[in-house]
Amino acid sequence: MRQWDCFLEPYKQAVDELKVKLKGLRAQYDLEDVHRPVEFVTGRVKPLASIYDKTLEKGIPFEPSAELAAELPDIAGLRMMCQFVDDIETVVETLRQRKDIEVVEERNYIANTKPSGYRSYHMIIKYPVQTIHGEKTILAEIQIRTLAMNFWASIEHSLNYKYKGALPEEIHHRLIRAAEAAFRLDEEMSLIRNEIQDAQQYFSAHKETSKRNYNQSGGHKE
Ligand code: 0O2
Ligand code: 0O2
């Protein structure tokens, strides 16, 4: 077990660091008073049980090794959720330009929807982690998707887990229809994107004014 802990430690560090960095993008966009393409960011290290399942699927030994690290590029996984489909391209381009990560593979499951109905943009990156034994470069996966894509994927993931991948026909059919509905929701939101952004900017400005008025009225004492 200690061997696994040592093996997974750089991945934990990478997830923690990348979460801070990717969440930091949001704050930067907010400061510039422009629409922020990132709604929220999550991250996780793949649980050992899932690593085990993946090794069985891929027919590789379940041991902390260089082979396992190369075969499972999503031991460190990050997700970036966006409001609009167009935001995804902005985020992808921002990630491509970063100096602290190296993009080694991109998979566009938005242009190429999976047969399940799954849509998302995946990037596999190399990320250097500083350890007490020097620098260690690990692979990590960043999934970029809209809130609608995320809603569908999380529901589908839990149903697949419940039915161990063998979904009853009726549920499978409904999931395909739900994927189509999520796609239409993204399309509809894109069509009224300007209207939504104006409303959001108006709401933020209104919140700022209320805060200022409250502070000036003596409500806030530092
Ligand atoms: P904020 O400012 O509230 O957005 P953590 O270590 O807790 O920061 P972790 O462990 O990945 O991150 O937590 P989790 O629960 O996966 O969620 C990470 C961030 O995403 C949290 O925000 C959640 O509030 C936010 N989040 C999760 N699900 C949703 C969702 O469906 N919609 C929206 N809008 N946000 C969600 P933070 O980090 O507390 O910051
Ligand atoms: P988790 O952590 O449970 O999400 P492989 O090369 O075989 O390892 P594959 O399928 O070629 O994997 O890689 P892919 O499809 O680029 O990325 C795999 C990850 O994408 C999955 O991770 C899911 O997070 C997500 N994903 C891919 N297809 C689907 C799908 O049909 N439904 C849902 N809900 N998610 C999907 P894991 O391995 O499931 O791990």
Image: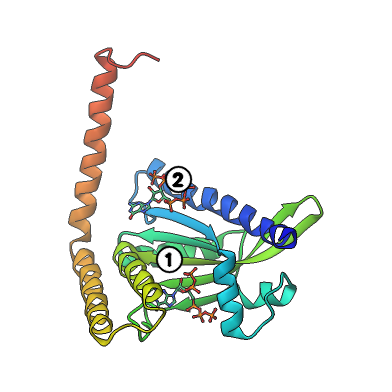
Q: Provide the residue designation for mark 1.
A: 144
Residue 7 lies, with reference to residue 118, above or below; the image says above
Residue 199: % across, % down: 19, 48
Reply above or below: 75 against 194: below
Evaluate whether residue 75 shows in this view: no
Q: Residue 6: which quarter of the image?
A: bottom right
The front one of 124 and 7 is 7
At a point 23% along the width and 47% down the height, the residue shown is 200
Q: Residues within 10 Å of mark 2 (few under 14, many from 20)?
A: few
Q: Nearer the viewer, residue 9 or 35?
A: 9
Sequence-first tag of 1 and 2: 2
Mark 2 residue element: helix
Decide if ligand 2 comes within 8 Å of the CB at mark 1. no
- Residue drawn where x is 37% and y is 81% of the image: 111
Is residue 6 found left or right of 196 in the rendered image?
right
Query: Which kind of residue does numbered mark 1 sit on?
Result: Ile
| Ligand 1 under 8 Å from disc 2 Cβ | no
The alpha-carbon separation of the residues under discs 1 and 2 comes to 18 Å
Image coordinates for residue 131, horizontal then vertical, percent: 75, 52
Left or right of residue 62, residue 140 in this image: left
Q: Is mark 1 on a helix, strand or loop?
A: strand
Residue 32 visible, this angle: yes
Nearer the camera: disc 1 or disc 2: 1
Residue on which disc 2 sits: 28
Quarter of image, res 121: bottom left
Spot occupied by residue 52 in the image (x, y as percentages of width and height): 60, 73
